Amino acid sequence: MPFSPRATFLSWLLLATVYVGSLHADGLARLKEERLVRVRQSILELSKNREEPVRSGRFVDMRANLHVHSRFSHDSRGSLDEIVAAAKRAGTRVLMFTEHPAEDYDFYQDGHQGLHDGVLCIPGAEMKGFLCYPTGSVRGIENEPPQGLSDLIRGRDGLMFVSHLEERMEWRIRGVTGVEIYNTHADFKDETALLKALRNPLWLLQSAELFRKYPQEAFSALQDYPADYLRRWDELCVDGPHTGVSANDAH
């Protein structure tokens, strides 16, 4: 059977949600220890039965983290060393940065690039509604409209992904590389009860042990099936190929 990125992504998302309650429940309702235990048990069972797919040809699979911010961005404090160390712990071999552009630095010229402790860093930016990965500096063309910016960067062999699709459902950008079919930040924004709880210091103290014991399972509690993203992706794929990417949106 040919490799299907969409099938792989959906299998992962289903695993993360199947034992933590309804796909439409608020994340707070899913943060119950008995449910997190069932998630862990399910993951362990899947790990036992999982068979590594056999790859042919010259390409190899690498775990990559796309949509990553560092200290270059105004809303992140992560240093390159910290981010690379976390990537190595997770088995990530490629970091595709998406800094918020600013006047005091050039995200391509000054951004993180090359190998750092065995992890490949690729400079990019989150700008004008895109995750942009140019092949050189884009100083002077930042004010282009979305279609013009995409044409310029794609014309120079760069990559352009439409980001935060929930804000741009009407966009039809010709020649774009693809779109996000999941975004962690976008998924988190509708967790109203969980957001309220996170502002409560007492709740955080009471939940600290739960997060310590079940870090990944607790994180998965905020994840919902991205029906709106996938529906829009299907519509765009009718017009032409659109690579779907799952965005970590790490800060």
Image (cartoon, grey):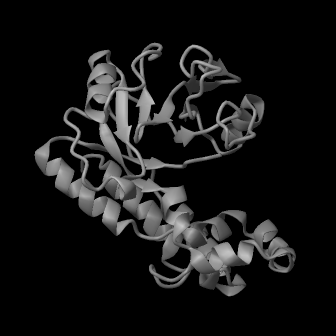
**Residue 229 higher or lower than 84, as above or below:** below
In this image, 235 relative to 214: left or right?
left
Residue 95 lies in what quarter of the image? top right
Residue 41 seen anywhere in this rendered image of the structure:
yes
- Give the vertical position of 32 relative to 64 (above or below): below
Q: Nearer the viewer, residue 53 or 211?
A: 211
Above or below, comparing residue 91 to residue 23 in the picture: above
For residue 38, say whether it is visible.
no
Name the foreground residue: 202 vs 96: 202
Give left or right: position of 81 versus 144: right
Q: Splitting the image into 4 quarters, where does residue 87 fall?
A: top right
Nearest to the observer: residue 235 or residue 22: 235
Q: Residue at x 55, y 29 (%)?
A: 101
Spot occupied by residue 222 in the image (x, y as percentages of width and height):
57, 70
209 to 153, vertically: above or below: below
Residue 242 % position (x, y): 25, 42
**Which residue is rendered at x = 32% and y = 15% of the image?**
156
What is the x, y in percent for residue 4?
30, 50
Residue 188 is situated, as x and y percent measured from the top left of the image, at 55, 65
Q: Residue at x 30, y 20 (%)?
A: 152
* Residue beneath the point at 26% across and 54% down: 233
Residue 220 left/right relative to 142: right
Q: Residue furthest left?
A: 239
Number of dots carrying numbers: 0
